[in-house]
Amino acid sequence: MSKEERAEADIEVLIAALASKVGTERQKARLSLGNEGHAAVPALCDALRKSKAKIVRWEAAKTLGAICDPDSIPFLVEALEDRDFDVAWLAAKALEKRLYGRICG
């Protein structure tokens, strides 16, 4: 397995951990995904768009907000219409960071 394949597999494990019933496990996965930065963005965007679990979408939106990668913008805009208010709110906060240059630079 190549280094890239291993990194992708690690990211998928972390994405799966976003569904944990244990809050500290979700937080650890979220922080690890944030440390992956751009490499985690495609998987996080996929989770934000496709997951049926509110908590996974919530964690993905929160993580994307922390990463501040421009590739996530279309997915965050789409998430503004999420069926769950909390997910839509986090997407709005993530976009606000981008618009006002807070934290993202």
Image: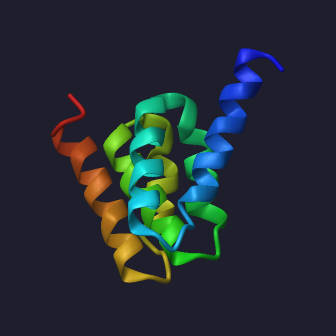
Residue 85, percent across and down?
37, 81
Which residue sits furthest top? 2
The residue positioned 55% from the left and 37% from the top of the image is 40
State the residue at coordinates (45%, 60%). Answer: 26
By what rule are the colours in the image chosen? rainbow
Closer to the camera, 61 or 78? 61
The image quadrant where one finds the C terminus is top left
Residue appearing at x 31%, y 62% in the figure? 92
In the image shown, does 78 or 22 lie closer to the viewer? 22
Q: Is residue 58 left or right of residue 96?
A: right
Q: Quadrant of residue 77?
A: bottom left
* Drawn side of residue 25 relative to residue 13, left or right: left
Give the image location of residue 32, x and y in percent: 45, 40
Say above or below: 64 vs 48.
above
Viewer-closest of 74 and 36: 36
Q: Is residue 28 left or right of residue 46?
A: left
Which quadrant of the view contains residue 101? top left
Quadrant assignment for the N terminus: top right
Labels in figure, total: 0
Q: Which of the pair 22/100 is nearer the observer?
A: 22
Residue drawn at the location 31% of the way across and 52% of the way down: 95
Point out the residue furthest to the right here. Answer: 1
Q: Position of residue 18 (x, y in %)?
A: 53, 60
86 lies above or below 7: below
